[in-house]
Image: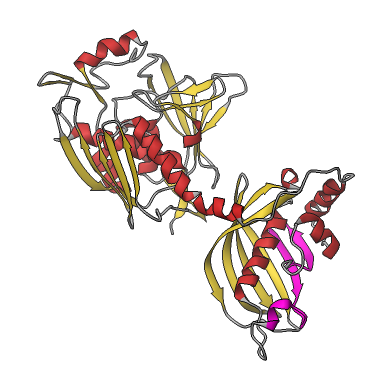
């Protein structure tokens, strides 16, 4: 798994907005790991930001628009494609207008400023998503199917409504192929669409300098076509940009026939729904909600203790997490230091699972060591005051290793480090020890929900 990436230094570009016709100054800034890509409107009071996520998509007519409240940012796909094509995970895109500059209608100019600024790796690992099964979408004339794949590949067919200018292209998308095969492809439209676009107050900044116009059998452009299949390659460029709204790279082969921004974004929603399916299953098997009640400030007091790094005894642990006998896997928290926590579970002959695991040869089940890591990680998330009083739902485990059996009389020391936290989702690296020896380890992912 590769590490996340951001820019080495700010990258700036100025030009005209395609639909607004306004002069736009854009600067792409480096951003911390796990922060994702977001747009910032520096021309508005408070400099509001919008995350480049499919949840914030407001419109998909002729381009992709993000919206949050009254703030909108149009035609985001070309700059997002440049970032995604190079594998840049974290960036802030500052704009002094409501859309990025259109440049020449492709991503070429954005690629130039990104290359000049440089791309640097970050310490945190990049998380990709491998579909668990094919995802299919049919919407009007559009058909799209995503198959699991080791890398990311796009196979695309485009055509106008009369079946003219039908083009096909297929390529594995890597930083090199992105720059060489897709990034130079310009946006295009049909001549008969222009009047409609103008009447709808669009393409005020449009010209043959930033778009290719098709009129009957003629192609109107200020320069020769950059690729034999420039039209379908631009459709693929749009796909790269729109799919980045998932928030993480996809490992799959996307086959698309007559794609559109609306269909691209709907495919992202379908991928997101599949990706979150284990989360919904975890919620279904989680503990039932506890009715809200006044606690006389107890939650605030516990949060203060946690933030101070003070250890927590068994009673305080049970005030934080809802687990009870026989499924409470934490007896005491020894220490909390920043993103690290150490807790203890005393393994006695009275543990109920020893009756069947195994008679005459009692061993603590490895899955319960995993559960202990998840419970301790959930406690760690509560060092953030806004999370106090919530429940940690165990979602998944990766890189799991069991090294030695844990026996009655052992003291299980659980050490957890929070390596990623985005909203209510946390990912932690956990290690269980007996004495100085590691008996198990894993990466656990969990989600916090209201109690």
* Pick the front one: 338 or 291: 291
For the view shown, which residue lies furthest in the right direction? Answer: 296
Residue 313 in sight in this render: no
Counting the numbered discs, the total is: 0
For the N terminus, the quadrant is bottom left
Residue 14 is a magenta residue: no
Please tell me whether residue 139 is drawn above or below residue 372 in the rendered image. Answer: above
Q: How is the image coloured?
A: secondary structure
Q: Position of residue 14 (x, y in %)?
A: 40, 23
For the view shown, which residue lies furthest in the top direction? Answer: 199
Residue 189 in sight in this render: yes
Q: Quadrant of residue 317?
A: bottom right
Q: Position of residue 152 (x, y in %)?
A: 32, 50
Q: Residue at x 28, y 38 (%)?
A: 143
For the view shown, which residue lies furthest in the left direction? Answer: 217
* Pick the front one: 269 or 283: 283
Is residue 173 toward the left or the right of residue 57 in the image?
left
Please tell me whether residue 410 is drawn above or below residue 177 in the rendered image. Answer: below
Is residue 46 toward the left or the right of residue 88 in the image?
right
Is residue 281 toward the left or the right of residue 296 in the image?
left
Span shown in magenta:
330-355
Please tell me whether residue 417 is drawn above or below residue 187 in the rendered image. Answer: below
Residue 333 is a magenta residue: yes
* Pick the front one: 362 or 426: 362
Q: Position of residue 433 (x, y in %)?
A: 67, 76
Please tell me whether residue 292 is drawn above or below residue 252 in the rendered image. Answer: above
* Pick the front one: 334 or 26: 334
Q: Position of residue 265 (x, y in %)?
A: 40, 35
């Amino acid at each position: 798994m590769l590490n996340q990436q951001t820019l080495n230094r700010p990258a700036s570009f100025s030009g005209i907005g395609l639909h607004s016709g306004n002069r736009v100054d854009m600067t792409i800034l480096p951003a911390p790991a796990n922060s994702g890509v977001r747009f910032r409107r520096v021309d508005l009071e408070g400099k509001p930001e919008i995350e480049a996520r499919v949840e914030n998509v407001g419109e998909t007519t002729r381009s992709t628009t993000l919206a949050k409240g009254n703030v909108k940012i149009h035609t985001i796909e070309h700059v997002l494609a440049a970032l995604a094509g190079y594998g840049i995970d974290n960036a802030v895109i500052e704009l002094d207008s409501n859309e990025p500059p259109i440049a020449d209608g492709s991503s070429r100019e954005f690629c130039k400023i990104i290359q000049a600024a440089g791309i640097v790796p970050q310490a945190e690992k990049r998380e990709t998503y491998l579909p668990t099964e094919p995802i299919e979408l049919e919407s009007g004339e559009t058909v799209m199917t995503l198959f699991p794949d080791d890398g990311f590949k796009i196979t695309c067919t485009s055509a106008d409504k009369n079946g003219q200018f039908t083009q096909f292209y297929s390529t594995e998308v890597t930083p090199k192929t992105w720059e060489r095969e897709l990034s130079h492809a310009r946006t295009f439209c049909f001549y008969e669409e222009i009047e409609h676009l103008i009447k709808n107050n669009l393409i005020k900044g449009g010209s043959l300098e930033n778009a290719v116009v098709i009129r009957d059998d003629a192609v109107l452009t200020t320069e020769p076509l950059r690729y034999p299949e420039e039209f379908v390659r631009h459709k693929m460029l749009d796909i790269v940009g729109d799919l980045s709204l998932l928030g993480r790279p996809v490992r799959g082969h996307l086959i698309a026939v007559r794609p559109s921004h609306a269909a691209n974004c709907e495919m992202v929603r379908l991928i997101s729904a599949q990706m979150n399916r284990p989360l919904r299953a975890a919620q279904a098997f989680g503990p039932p909600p506890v009715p809200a009640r006044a606690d006389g400030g107890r939650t605030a007091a516990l949060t203060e203790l946690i933030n101070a790094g003070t250890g927590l005894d068994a009673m305080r642990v049970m005030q934080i997490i809802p687990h009870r006998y026989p499924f409470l896997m934490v007896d005491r928290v020894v220490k909390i230091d920043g993103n690290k926590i150490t807790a203890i579970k005393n393994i006695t002959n009275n543990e109920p699972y020893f009756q069947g695991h195994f008679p005459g040869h009692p061993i603590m089940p490895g899955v319960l060591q995993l559960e202990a890591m998840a419970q301790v990680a959930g406690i760690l998330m509560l060092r953030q005051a806004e999370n106090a009083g919530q429940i940690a739902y165990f979602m998944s485990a990766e890189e799991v290793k069991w090294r030695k059996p844990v026996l009655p009389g052992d003291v299980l020391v659980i050490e957890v480090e929070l390596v990623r936290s985005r909203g209510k989702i946390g990912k932690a690296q956990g290690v269980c020890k007996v004495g100085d020896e590691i008996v198990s380890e894993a990466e656990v992912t969990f989600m916090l929900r209201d109690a």
